[in-house]
Every structure is written in structure tokens, then in C-alpha cells.
Amino acid sequence: MDIVLSGIRPTGNLHLGNYFGAVKNFVRMQEENKCFFFIADYHSLTTHPTPADLHGNVKQVLVEYLAAGLDPDKSTLYVQSDVPEIVELYLFLNMNAYLGELERVTTFKEKARKQPDNINAGLLTYPSLMAADILIHNAHKVPVGKDQEQHLEMARTFARRFNRMYKQEYFNIPQAYNFGAELVKIPGLDGSGKMGKSEGEGNAIFLIDDEKTIRKKVMKAVTDTGPTQPNQTKPEVIENLFSLLKVVSTPEVVNHFDEQYNNCSIRYGDLKKQLAEDMVAFTAPIRQKILDLAANEAYISKVARQGAEKARESASKTIREVREIIGFRHF
Ligand code: TYM
């Protein structure tokens, strides 16, 4: 049985990119694998949230995970900061993580550009914390979107390095995973190429968005002036709209608009209307569950406590063994 793990930073609501990049895989995988899903609240400290925001965001993501279909009886759903063993493994991995390789990570370079006044050590060592998240349960598969590919490569590097250093195949070599196919990047609505919570108003469709909001955002999506020749290649902004259609609509709907594009009769307004309706149909039941669950404080607390207990059981076993391998012995 494979060990599967994935996580998300609690820095905003879940959007369709998170869902189709990571959560959907996970919901399916929890039936047949040993699954861990967590909320990466240590990671979110790189951007210095206030204490009140931090707790509220963690709760919100927990609720949204459950609403999106994560079953706490089938998988282990927990908050990262409830499992301090992760921090210990992070420290061990950092002893063999080198400045040069950490500085070359694309997300580090991007963040350093975006927040030049806050290039902290946590940002630099983000990949070793992420590797600790994965290796603490010795995961085989990690369902993530394309943007996390490089981080997964680093996790593999750190796992191999540890195994080599201590001359034993202790850690599994974790693989980024998307139903055995290419990792996906769900585009945003503003033509920016990636749906993301920090990409600006109107770029992302959140699972919590109501019908009106979804329609408004989709109708404003960036397009071009339309095809002028039959079967011409779609420019990126149009390709992006079709990519969104592919995840929420039926193949018949996608083919219909594809044909219209190819014979130059397409009206983007019609495509957007259909896209908005299909997005509403997809998110509405999840949204209702979010609203119901958010009101149930006692259940949410119970899920978090049970998840922490299960996650710590697995994590403490790893830390005990890793300490032994490294050479820490009790007197
Ligand atoms: P985060 O919080 O940015 O995103 C959570 C998950 O959603 C995926 N994702 C997308 N996939 C496709 N298209 C998009 N537009 C899109 N936007 C987001 C991300 O790839 C991710 O899978 N570093 C991670 C959190 C993390 C983690 C881990 C993940 C910490 N430790 C260990 C896996 C394993 C992050 O910032 O994801």
C-alpha cells in the first residue's frame, strides 16, 4: 500500500487550482492508500501572518478540505504545527542542505523579488521543511500541481542524500503525482497563466464563491478578438479558457466550442456563460458543505485532534529511527 501525502498553505481560501492540482487526486487516492493530508501553517509563517489571521485561516482550510471530500476516517487530516517532530526532521535535513541549491529554487527567487524586505531564512529553507513534511511519513506519492515540481525534486535529493550518508535505504524516494499523468497547472481568469490566491482579484474561482461572484468573474475573463482563420492555433488566453472548460464541463461541451472555434463561429460570451454555469454546478454542493461545516466547531476540533494523534504516531516512529541512524543515543 502506498503512503500518500500532500499539503496546502493556509493563506486563503481553496480555489479550483488547488482542487484540480492536488485535492481531487487525494480524494480518490484515500480509498486505497495510506493518506496524510495536512495544513502547512509553519510554511505560512514566511509571510508573517498575525496570530488571529493564522488561526482563522487554518480553520478555514480544514473546513474546505473536509467539504471537498477528504474523509478523516480514511485519511489522516492534521495541522502541521500539531506535529513538532516535523521541525526536528527539518533541522536534520538542513544540516545537509546547501546554500547554492536553495538559492537556485525558482519559488525562492520569485518570493525574494516580491518581498525584498523579508527574505528570511525560512523562505530559503522552504524546500527542506517541505521535504521534512514528506519524509516524516516516508511518503511514496505526493499529489501536487506543476508549480510544486521543483520542490519535489529537492525532497528526492534530500532523501537520497540522507540514505547515501548513512548507508541505508531508509527514506522512500517520493514522486510528485497526478493520476499517473503530467502534473497540471490550472490557469487563472486574467490571462496570467496560473490560478492563484495572490494573483489579484478576479483571477481565481474559490470553492466558497457564490453563484453571482462566479458569473461575474468568468464573464470578465480575458479573451481576444476571435479567430480569423479556420483551425488556427489558439493563443494562450483562449487555450486557458478551454483548459478551465475541460476540468468542469463535459467532453461534449468542450468539443462543441472547439468546433465553433475552428470554424470561426465562436462567441466567447456563450463559452463564458457555459463555463460559469458548469463552475457553479461544480462548486455549489462544496460551498454548501463549507457553510454547514464552518458552523460545527466541535466537529472541526475533533477532526484536528484525532488527526494530530494519528500523524504524531507515524512521525514519532520516523524520528525515533532517524535519531538512531544519525547516532543520537540516550545515556
Ligand atoms: P499551495 O498552498 O500553494 O497549493 C496547494 C496545492 O495546490 C496546487 N495548486 C495548483 N495546482 C494546479 N494549478 C494551479 N493553478 C494551482 N495552484 C495551486 C499546488 O501545486 C499544491 O499542490 N508548498 C506547498 C504546500 C506544502 C506541501 C508540502 C505540498 C507544504 N509542504 C508537502 C505537498 C507536500 C504550497 O505552497 O502549496
Image (spheres, helix red, strand yellow):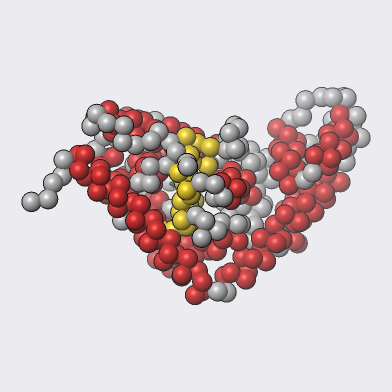
Above or below 227: residue 71:
below
Above or below 40: residue 57:
below
Indicate the quadrant where residue 170 lies.
top left
Indicate the quadrant where residue 183 lies.
top right
- How far from the left and from the top, in percent, is residue 163? 29, 31
Name which residue lies at 74% across and 40% down: 246
Indicate the quadrant where residue 184 lies.
top right
- How far from the left and from the top, in percent, is residue 262? 86, 29
The answer to whether residue 11 is seen in the rendering is no
Name which residue lies at 27% across and 28% down: 164
Which residue is farthest left? 331
**Residue 331 or 57: which is nearer the viewer?**
331
Name which residue lies at 42% across and 42% down: 139
Above or below 166: residue 210:
below
**Residue 129 or 118: which is nearer the viewer?**
129
**Residue 228 or 164: which is nearer the viewer?**
164
Above or below 212: residue 236:
above
